């Protein structure tokens, strides 16, 4: 298995949602690109999140 995509557990952690439709809704609202696999689960590329990671500015 590769680390190309987030695991289902990581998507639950990211979205705070367990239902695939709710996960997709949350991903859309947050502008996180994903596709839906044949089983109906959202699939998120790990590289998308790593590329867009920006640390919070210092206070």
Image (cartoon, helix red, strand yellow):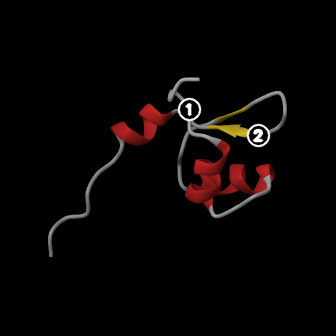
Q: Residue at x 65, y 55 (%)?
A: 12
Q: Nearer the viewer, residue 16 or 33?
A: 16
Q: Nearer the viewer, residue 55 or 9?
A: 9
Secondary element under disc 1, as helix, strand or loop, is loop
Residue located farthest toward the top when viewing the structure as drawn:
1
- Residue at 70%, 49% (x, y): give it: 24
Which label is found at residue 21?
none
Report the quarter where the N terminus lies.
Answer: top right
Q: Does residue 28 appear anywhere in the picture? A: no
Pointer 2 or 1: first along the chain: 1
Q: CA distance from mark 2 to mark 1?
A: 12 Å
Report x, y in % for residue 59.
Answer: 15, 76
Q: Quadrant of residue 7 in the image? A: top right
Packing grade of label 1 (10 A; few <14, some 14-19, many >=20) is: some
- Residue 26 visible to an observer of this rendering: yes
Residue picked out by circle 1: 5
**Residue furthest out toward the right:** 39
In this rendering, position of residue 44 left or right of residue 17: left
Would residue 26 appear left or right of 55 to someone viewing this image?
right
Q: Residue at x 53, y 32 (%)?
A: 45
Q: Residue 14: x, y in percent?
A: 56, 56
- Residue 26 is situated, as x and y percent measured from the top left of the image, at 64, 57
User: Does 45 sit above or below residue 21?
Assistant: above
Are there few (<14), some (14-19), or many (20+) residues within 10 Å of tag 2?
some
Residue 43 image point, x, y percent: 65, 35
Front residue (pair 31, 47):
47
Label 2 belongs to which residue? 41
Toward the viewer: 49 or 18? 18
Q: Secondary structure at mark 2?
A: loop
Above or below for 11 versus 2: below
């Amino acid at each position: 298995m590769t680390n190309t995509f987030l695991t289902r557990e990581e998507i639950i952690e990211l979205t705070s949602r367990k239902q695939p439709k709710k996960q997709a809704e949350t991903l859309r609202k947050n502008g996180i690109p994903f596709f839906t696999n044949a089983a109906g689960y959202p699939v998120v590329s790990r590289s998308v999140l790593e590329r867009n990671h920006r640390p919070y500015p210092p206070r």
